[in-house]
Amino acid sequence: MAKKEIPYKIYLEESEMPKYWYNLRADMVNKPAPLLDAKTRKPMTAEDLSPVFCDELIQQELNDTQAYFEIPEEILNFYKMYRPAPLVRAYCLEEKLQTPAKIYYKFEGNNTSGSHKLNSAIAQAYYAKKQGLKGVTTETGAGQWGTALSMACAYLGLDCKVYMVKVSYEQKPFRREVMRTYGASVTPSPSMETEVGKKILAEHPGTTGSLGCAISEAVEKATSLPGYRYVLGSVLNQVMLHQTVIGLETKAAMDKYDIKPDIIIGCAGGGSNLGGLIAPFMGEKIKGEADYRIIAVEPETCPSFTRGKYAYDYCDTGMICPLAKMYTLGSGFIPAGTHSGGLRFHGMNPTLSQLYADGLMEAVSVPQTAVFAAAEEFARVEGILPAPESSHAIKVAIDEALKCKETGEEKTILFGLTGTGYFDMMAYEKFHDGKMVDYVPTEEELAKGFSYLPKMD
Ligand SMILES: *Cc1c(COP(=O)(O)O)cnc(C)c1O
């Protein structure tokens, strides 16, 4: 039973927690493309960005040379309330699958917000507070990011205004109430509170809203209220930077037991958890110190990597945010009903996009019924009830483990388990009742999305 020498859970000591975030861009040969001003098409400067974003976060966003950023002590102390997160050896899943593969997952669901988003929420709220701001505004779709941000703001005594996509506001009252418990004000979007909201409502009466529209409202609010800035839960490089705490902890825990993953898998919405998990491993890969197979998993309904274009695009529907070069389906692309709200964004983090373009990582897309089947299989043996988003990674980890069963290879598979699914039981219900359907967007639908891409010359 030599195999049991590795414990079910590998925890780090508090003293072994990472004290720096790792900026992978510093070690990349081909740097991600700069953000551009939507009007002038010139690279955005810190000054251009300062009406919208917090000053120190802008420095982090624009810096692609400094490899390490010290984690301020206040943030480290907050992290200690729910970190280090466990790295779990999935012995029970291995047994169930009868695979020679060794499966590990990093579990980020051990906090009230239920996902990894708190790692960046506390960092962004901290820099807003440090700048002397009164509060921050943001958007939220399914509600994970808004929940995380409201927790961080409550801790630091900052005001938090959340624009929540109207359909989620009405259909997902529980996350909304968690946000209000932490003192956030939650407005269904589109609203009559902003000019862009009024305009959208006039043009589309009765619309149930979209993420891109809520972003436009939150940005307008931040720039029109003194003492406020806008913060975002994914996609930006600063968010990926904060999320490297996931990968750094994972690497430290694996190093303790001389474990080297062969395959690293993560779900990809805007790319922040995947980018954070793989960062230290990808750094070694780029420097030629080690090799890893890295796989991004996305829903078939919103296939940014696997069917998107690598192009400059808007991050929001109102087209008021800067242009980012990324794998994208177009800012007007509306994904069909997927139950993984956190994976519905049309674009992908610019750093990951460059790595993918350079062939340093792979991507696959999976249908949602297969994702829920994998979620259920996992829940029944490992105990944790996974978020639908996270279950995309589970699905591909299981597929890879089953391939090992066929070939007899003892590969080591690592995946990111980003959160829990307690607020997603309506989706589980649909799956159990056989009412969940899979949908693959047609070429025509994708072409329509691409038609929204800004013309670059
Ligand atoms: C938001 C979310 C994701 C996707 O976001 P990324 O920025 O791609 O990491 C994945 N899992 C959960 C649980 C989420 O809440």
Image: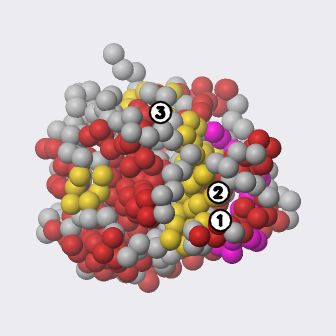
Q: Give the range drawn in magenta.
A: 364-384
Q: What element carries label 2?
A: strand
Q: In this view, does 214 lie above or below 376?
A: above
**Where residue 202 sits: x, y (%)?**
48, 49
Distance, label 2 to label 1, CA atoms, is: 9 Å
Q: Is residue 403 covered in magenta?
A: no
Q: Disc 3 marks which amino acid?
A: Leu
Q: Is mark 1 on a helix, strand or loop?
A: helix
Dominant SS of magenta comes to helix
Looking at the rendered structure, which numbered label has been put on residue 3?
1
**Where residue 393 sits: x, y (%)?**
62, 53
Q: Tell me the mark number nearer the camera, choosing from 2 and 1.
A: 1
Q: Tell me the mark number nearer the camera, choosing from 3 and 1.
A: 1
User: Neighbour class for label 1 at 10 Å: few (<14), some, many (≥20)?
Assistant: few
Q: Which of marks 3 and 2 is nearer the N terminus?
A: 2
Q: Disc 1 marks which amino acid?
A: Lys
Q: Which residue lies furthest to the bottom in this view?
A: 181
The residue at 38%/58% (across/down) is: 248
Q: Disc 2 marks which amino acid?
A: Lys
Q: In this view, does 170 lie to the left or right of 21?
A: right
Residue under numbered circle 2? 102
Residue under numbered circle 3? 360
**Where residue 233 sits: x, y (%)?**
40, 57
Q: In this view, does 402 lie to the left or right of 209?
A: right
Q: Which of marks 2 and 1 is nearer the N terminus?
A: 1
User: Neighbour class for label 2 at 10 Å: few (<14), some, many (≥20)?
Assistant: many
Q: CB of mark 2 within 8 Å of CB of mark 1?
A: yes
Q: Which residue lies furthest to the front in this view?
A: 2
Quadrant of image for the N terminus: bottom right
In the image shown, does 270 or 355 lie closer to the viewer? 355
The residue at 44%/83% (across/down) is: 181
Q: Is residue 372 covered in magenta?
A: yes
